[in-house]
Image (cartoon, grey):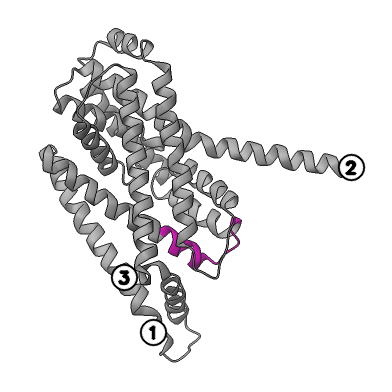
Amino acid sequence: MKKKILLVLIWSIVAYFLYKFLKPVDFNRVLEEIQNANSKWLVVGFFFNFSILIIWTALWSILFPRNISVSFWRLFQINTFMSTSCNTLPFPGGHAFGLVLLARLAKVKHSVALSVLALDQMMEGIVKVVILALATSFSPLPEQMQKGFQFFILLILIFSISMFYAAHKIPEKILKEKASSTLFFKFKMFISQWAGHLEVLKDYRVFCLGLSLALVMMALQVFGIWAVQKSLGQVIPFLTTILVMAALNLATIFPLTPGNFGVYEATALLIYQYAGFSLEVSLSLAFLQHICFLVPMAGTGWMVFLFKTLSAVDNRNDFK
């Protein structure tokens, strides 16, 4: 009951801000802009966003401890399922569901799954800080987002230092302690196991490779936004496109609504208006960008699930 009340409250807040933003919009012009969009460029935008899943899976594959091997196809399936859950459920439901999926489908301990997801979030966070710093150095964000950016930097800094400390110090410290049957000691042993799986943070070459893959993911997202801009015939400075991507990543760190509906559109609308575009063009860009991003990131998991289900049915029929 409490969750339902919270969801209603969140959606009410989003609806209020959308109403404020969209009240003066000429929706006939927005519809006209969307109808005139170049479908070829939209397909290109879709492809760039779908490619994020491929690179994301490659990132996961190097984050596992050396003694654990999971096939790329299985990791891709898990990755698409997690992407679907994160773009469907509000925070932290999608991430929790992804953790359970990774542990069960990859057949690894929960401590291993948690280490992979923690490393993934850390590397993405570091790259986001770099991109945000680059974007704001050329075109400052609005004041409210500047404060959010500063808080995000502090958060990633604390998280990263904690991760490096865990990888290098925690396993040694806890293993020296005397064994005990208490719940607290079992929890400390789980933390020790988790920290022991953070091998990537002890190998600078693999760590740099992981950061490079996370950077490629951000670049693909930028190119996806750029392709949508091209579909509407808008010639926008590339640094503005990076600023849009940076602002969207900052605003959608913790998904408050399913698929970030409302939050995504309001953020993109704000940045495009900040860059000098009309309400109608800004809203058209925001809507098409979100669709081109959401369809592959949320829809691919459902397609993979359907494929697996049909394959399982075919296999059962073959044995009859």
Q: Residues within 10 Å of mark 1 (few under 14, many from 20)?
A: some
Q: Which residues are magenta?
A: 105-117
Does the magenta portion include 316?
Answer: no
Q: Amino acid at mark 3?
A: Phe
Instruction: Say which label, 3 or 2, has the lower sequence index.
Output: 3
- Residue at position x 21%, y 18% in the image: 279
Badge 3 marks a residue whose secondary structure is helix
- In the image, 19 versus 27, the foreground residue is 27
Q: Tell me if residue 320 comes above or below residue 111 in the rendering.
A: above
Q: Main secondary structure of the magenta part?
A: helix
Look at label 1 and name its amino acid.
Answer: Glu
Label disc, if present, on residue 16 of the rendered structure: none
Label 3, label 2: how far apart the Cα atoms are: 54 Å
Instruction: Using a 10 Å C-alpha cutoff, classify the residue at mark 3 as few (fewer than 14 neighbours), some (14 to 19) or many (20 or more).
Output: some
Amino acid on which disc 2 is placed: Lys
Q: Is residue 140 above or below residue 236?
A: below
The numbered mark at residue 164 is 3
**What residue did someone put label 1 on?**
172
In percent of width and height, residue 303 lies at 58, 35
In this rendering, the label closer to the viewer, 3 or 2: 3
Residue 302, by quadrant, is top right
Residue 278 in the image: state x and y as whole percent.
18, 17
Task: Please state, as top left, top right, bottom left or bottom right, where the N terminus lies in the image.
Answer: top left
User: Considering the numbered disc 1 on the image, is that residue within a helix, a strand or a loop?
Assistant: helix
